[in-house]
Image (spheres, rainbow, N blue to C red):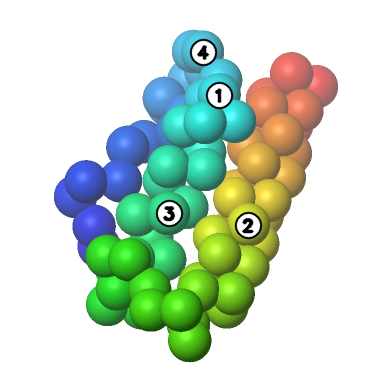
Amino acid sequence: MCRSIKRLREPGGGPVATDDEIREAALQYVRKVSGFREPSARHAEAFHAAVDEVARASKDLLASVIRTLSA
């Protein structure tokens, strides 16, 4: 979908993405979906809330995948 979004987990394991890397990927995703590079003041609250939610969901997903692979 968005080629500038960095892969956050390599197949077969490897280092885990940092919180900053996860947030940056979430920001890129929300930018792509919303069509905003930087939202106007009118849209800023919803934009930043979406970034937070996508980052949280991504972090939860990565944690779950890592736990499953470790079991």
Residue that badge 3 annotates: 27
Residue that badge 1 annotates: 18
Q: Name the quadrant of the N terminus.
A: bottom left
Q: Is residue 57 in view from this perspective? A: yes
Dot 1 or dot 2: first in sequence order is 1
Q: Quadrant of residue 40?
A: bottom left
Say which of 52 and 10 sits in front: 52
Labelled pair 3, 2 in contact (Cβ < 8 Å): no
Vertical comparison of 9 with 50: above or below: above
Mark 3–mark 2 distance (CA, rounded to whole Å)? 9 Å
Measuring 50% from the left and 74% from the top, which residue is drawn there?
44
Residue that badge 2 annotates: 52
Near mark 4 (Cα within 10 A), the count class, few <14, some 14-19 or many ≥20, is few
- On the image, the x and y values in percent for residue 50 come to 57, 68
Mark 2–mark 4 distance (CA, rounded to whole Å)? 22 Å
Q: Is residue 5 left or right of residue 30?
A: left
Measuring 38% from the left and 60% from the top, which residue is drawn there?
29
Mark 1–mark 3 distance (CA, rounded to whole Å)? 14 Å
